[in-house]
Image (spheres, helix red, strand yellow):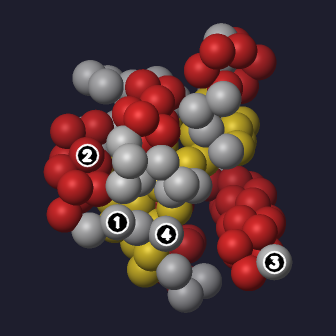
Amino acid sequence: MKILIADEDNLYRLVLSQLLYDDGYDVISTHTSGRAWEYLRRETPDICIFDAGLPGIHGMSMAERIRADGELRRLPVILLSAGAAAVPENLRAAADFFVKKSAEADKVVPLIEELLGKISGERSG
């Protein structure tokens, strides 16, 4: 399964990428929304994980763009947010899941894997 991660926090992104890679996922990561969008246009991953506060086109807007794109609209999107409760309700519809961004990426990985399992189950069922 191929995962795209976009997060401007280099250390967090690298640790999360490595943890997912160690669990057998093919991970592509970037620190900018522009590069993430370029990748999405070239090769579609199985799932996207965006920091909700990503600079430039923030993660919530990236999710909205994906939903508006005919080729990408069914792509699962997870938004990481330091404060998921602060995400406006109208933007929540663009993402499949919100995960509270923990200071420790290893605490986020089990949540992501649980969500990936749900997505895989929905696709096969």
Q: Quadrant of residue 87?
A: top right
Q: How crowded is mark 2: few (under 14 residues within 10 Å), some or many (20 or more)?
A: some
Identify the residue under disc 1: 44
In the drawing, what numbered circle is on residue 19?
none
Q: Which one is earlier in the sequence, the residue at label 3 or at label 2?
A: 2
Identify the residue under disc 3: 125
Asked whether the residues under the numbered discs 3 and 2 touch, taking CB atoms below 8 Å apart as contact, a structural biologist would say no
Number of marks in the image? 4
Q: How crowded is mark 3: few (under 14 residues within 10 Å), some or many (20 or more)?
A: few
Would residue 49 be visible to someone looking at this image? no
Identify the residue under disc 2: 37
In the drawing, what numbered circle is on residue 46?
4
Q: Residue at x 76, y 18 (%)?
A: 85
Q: How crowded is mark 1: few (under 14 residues within 10 Å), some or many (20 or more)?
A: some
x, y percent for residue 80: 59, 39
Choose between 45 and 68: the one closer to the eye.
Answer: 68
Choose between 12 and 33: the one closer to the eye.
Answer: 33
* Inter-mark Cα distance, 1 to 3: 22 Å
* Inter-mark Cα distance, 2 to 4: 14 Å
* Inter-mark Cα distance, 2 to 1: 10 Å
Q: Residue at x 34, y 66 (%)?
A: 44
Looking at the rendered structure, the kind of residue marked 1 is: Thr
* Inter-mark Cα distance, 1 to 4: 7 Å
